[in-house]
C-alpha cells in the first residue's frame, strides 16, 4: 500500500476546520471553522484569504448556482450573500432543547443539499440526515443517527455514501438522482481497526473514497467495492477532519484539520494543527455541485 505525506497549504489556527469545497468557476476554496463560527475562503485569482464571523457554529458551506452560498448553522440552514453580508434562514432546525447542530453537508448533482446533524452531548440515535430541495422544502433521508458526518456520491450518481462516525463504518445506499431518494443501506467499509474515527469524505472519478481520520492523523483512499484500503496520506496534525479535490484539473486534495481537544504538549508537537494541507494526486476528483442547479 502506498503512503504519501501532505504538506502545509494554508496556515490558519482553526479550532475545528471542516467542510472544504472547491468552486471551479470562481477559483475559490471554501471551508468552515465550526467552533470558530467562521466561514473561510481562499480566492486563488486574487491570492487572498478571507473569513466572516457567522455568529454561531457553522457546519458546512455549499455554493449556490446564483451568487452566494448556503451554510449550515447551529439553528438552521441559511443563504449568505457575500456583498451584503446578510444571512437569510431557509430551514429552521427543530431543536427546542438546543442540543443539536448541523454538521457536514453537500449538494447532490441535481442541486439539492444533503445535510446531517449531531447531538452536542453525544447522545445516540438523535441525529438526522435531511435533504433540502431546490424549492426550499425538506425531507428526512436517514434518522436514528448519532453523528452524521462524511457524505459523497459515486461518479455515475447511482450510489450515495454516508458516515455515522460512532459506528466506524461507511454505508452505501442506492441513489435515485431524479427523486433524490435512498434505497436500503449496506456497510462497505469497516473502520474499526483504523487509527482514529471516520470523519469527512469525498470521492474520485474512479469511484474510490477518500476518508479523513479524526484523531488518526491521516486521510485514506478506499475501494468501496472490495473494502480495501489502497493509500494512506500522512498529515502533520492528529485531528484530520475532511478533504476535497481542488484546482483546475481537480488533481489536488485539500485537507482540513482541527486544534480542538489538543493540549499544550500536542500543540507544541503539531504547531500547524488547524491549518489546511494538500497533496498532488494521480486521479481526478469529483466536481463540486451547487445548490439550485
Image: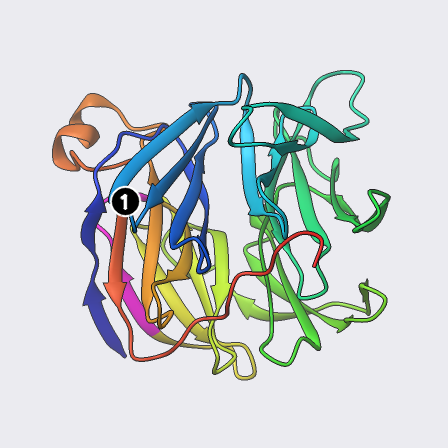
Q: Residues within 10 Å of mark 1 (few under 14, many from 20)?
A: few
Q: Is residue 265 magenta?
A: no
Q: Is residue 165 visible?
A: yes
Q: Residue at x 57, y 47 (%)?
A: 62
The quadrant in which residue 56 appears is top right
Count of all numbered marks drawn on residues in the image: 1
Q: Residue at x 60, y 23 (%)?
A: 86
The quadrant in which residue 74 appears is top right
Reply above or below: 207 against 160: below
Reply above or below: 78 against 234: above
- Magenta residues span 231-239
Instruction: Judge from the rendering whether residue 273 lies leftward or rightward of residue 40; answer left or right.
Output: left
Which element is circle 1 on? Answer: loop
Q: Residue at x 38, y 29 (%)?
A: 51
The quadrant of the image that shows the N terminus is bottom left
Q: Residue at x 43, y 71 (%)?
A: 285
The quadrant in which residue 96 appears is top right
The quadrant of the image that shows the C terminus is bottom right
The residue to which callout 1 is attached is 46
| Residue 233 location (% of width, % of height) | 27, 63
| Residue 10 location (% of width, % of height) | 24, 43
Amino acid at each position: 500500500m502506498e503512503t504519501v505525506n501532505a504538506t502545509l497549504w494554508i496556515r490558519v489556527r482553526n479550532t475545528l476546520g471542516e467542510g472544504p469545497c472547491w468552486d471551479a468557476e470562481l477559483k475559490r476554496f471554501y471551508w468552515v471553522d465550526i467552533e470558530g463560527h467562521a466561514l473561510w475562503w481562499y480566492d486563488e485569482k486574487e491570492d487572498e484569504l478571507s473569513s466572516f464571523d457567522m455568529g454561531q457554529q457553522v457546519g458546512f458551506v455549499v455554493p449556490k448556482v446564483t451568487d452566494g452560498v448556503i451554510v449550515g448553522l447551529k439553528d438552521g440552514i441559511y443563504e449568505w450573500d457575500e456583498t451584503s453580508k446578510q444571512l437569510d434562514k431557509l430551514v429552521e432546525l427543530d431543536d427546542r432543547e438546543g442540543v443539536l447542530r448541523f454538521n457536514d453537508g453537500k449538494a447532490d448533482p441535481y442541486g439539492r443539499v444533503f445535510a446531517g446533524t449531531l447531538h452536542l452531548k453525544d447522545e445516540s440515535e438523535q441525529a438526522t440526515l435531511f435533504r433540502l430541495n431546490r424549492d426550499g422544502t425538506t425531507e428526512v433521508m436517514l434518522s436514528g443517527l448519532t453523528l452524521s458526518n462524511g457524505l459523497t456520491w459515486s461518479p455515475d450518481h447511482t450510489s450515495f455514501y454516508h458516515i455515522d462516525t460512532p459506528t466506524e463504518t461507511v454505508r452505501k445506499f442506492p441513489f435515485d438522482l431524479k427523486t433524490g431518494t435512498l434505497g436500503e443501506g449496506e456497510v462497505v467499509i469497516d473502520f474499526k481497526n483504523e487509527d482514529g474515527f471516520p470523519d469527512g469524505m469525498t470521492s474520485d472519478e474512479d469511484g474510490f473514497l477518500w476518508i479523513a481520520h479524526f484523531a488518526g492523523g491521516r486521510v485514506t483512499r478506499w475501494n468501496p467495492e472490495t473494502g480495501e484500503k489502497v493509500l494512506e496520506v500522512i498529515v502533520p496534525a492528529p485531528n484530520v477532519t475532511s478533504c476535497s479535490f481542488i484546482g483546475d484539473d481537480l488533481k489536488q486534495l485539500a485537507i482540513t484539520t482541527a486544534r480542538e481537544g489538543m493540549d499544550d504538549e500536542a500543540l507544541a508537537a503539531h504547531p500547524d494543527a488547524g491549518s489546511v494541507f494538500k497533496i498532488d494526486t494521480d486521479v481526478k476528483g469529483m466536481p463540486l455541485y451547487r445548490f439550485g442547479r
